Image (cartoon, rainbow, N blue to C red):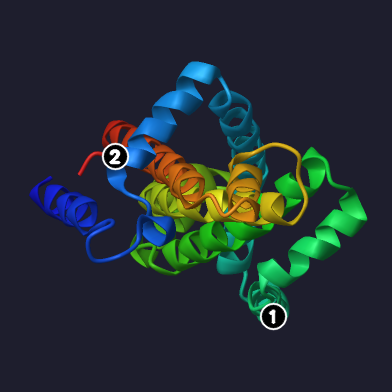
Amino acid sequence: MLIAVVIVGTWQLSSDRIFPSFYVSSPSAIAERLVDLVHSGELWPHLTQTLVEVALGMSIGVPLGAVLGIALGSSFLIGGWLLPYMMALYSLPRVVLAPLFIIWFGVGLLSKVVMVVTMVLFVVFYNVHQGVQQIDRDLVDVTRSMRATRWQTLRWVVVPSLVPWLVTGVRLSIGIALIGAVIAELIAASEGLGYYIKYSSNLLDVTGVFAGLAVITTVAIALDQLLKILERRIAPR
């Protein structure tokens, strides 16, 4: 909190003293804009749109990434075949793919959700895949010696061992998902926090840009804290 106070205080004192407020705005102006956005109701459609995109994208990307991570991590044959292709797809810059998603899926909700899925999927995949590699092989050998089926081994050994890795992947995915949604909205959208930032930028409204960024940061922090609480419940240390 002290670091935040120092940074914000320095920013406020520097605005129009060291740097022109036209370029950097000021914390007080941003706070005033946020209050206006809340009171006027202008913030809620943009915030709701972005949250819907993030929620839908993560609800698809997280399970898909987890399943792929388990499948490729558990099978040497499948992993050997598909892991290089996963790396090749992961290396593609999603910022460049965003215009293609707009062309393929339109300017509506679907293109934004697909963008979020592609951002989230690989983060979860690599976390879960690494978690599979770190599973205690002695536990797996014990289940095999007790003639457990593959499903029983997955249920009682693999999945519980992967919970911390999955939670970490989901926490990392929150910021990535917001980035993906905002990038897609910056390219083509009529609502959303990315759209509001782009609209403010077109008007040279730096305060509006920082206000949009402040909302995105607040949402990311709030979701991360909720996941921390969930992690303590389902994966206590």
Compared across the picture, whether 28 is left or right of 165 comes to left
Quarter-of-image position of residue 115: bottom right
Which of these two is toward me, 35 or 133? 35
Query: Total label count?
Result: 2
x and y percentages locating residue 96 in the rendered image: 73, 71
x and y percentages locating residue 30 in the rendered image: 37, 41
Compared across the picture, whether 195 is left or right of 146 comes to right
User: Quadrant of the image for the N terminus?
Assistant: top left
Answer yes or no: is residue 63 visible: no
In the image, what residue type sits under mark 1?
Answer: Ala
Q: Earlier in the sequence, mark 1 or mark 2?
A: 2
Q: Badge 1: how crowded within 10 Å, few (<14), some, or many (20+)?
A: few
User: Quadrant of the image for the C terminus?
Assistant: top left
Quarter-of-image position of residue 29: top left
Which of these two is toward me, 237 or 103? 103
Instruction: Find numbered disc 1 in the image and state the secondary structure of the residue it sits on.
Output: helix
Please give the label number shown on residue 88. Answer: 1
Answer yes or no: is residue 173 visible: yes
Instruction: Find numbered disc 2 in the image and state the secondary structure of the residue it sits on.
Output: helix
Q: Is residue 232 above or below residue 169?
A: above
x and y percentages locating residue 198 in the rendered image: 63, 52
Callouts 1 and 2 close, C-beta under 8 Å? no
In the image, what residue type sits under mark 2?
Answer: Ser
Q: CA distance from mark 1 to mark 2?
A: 45 Å
Q: Nearer the viewer, mark 1 or mark 2?
A: 2
Please give the label number shown on residue 28. Answer: 2
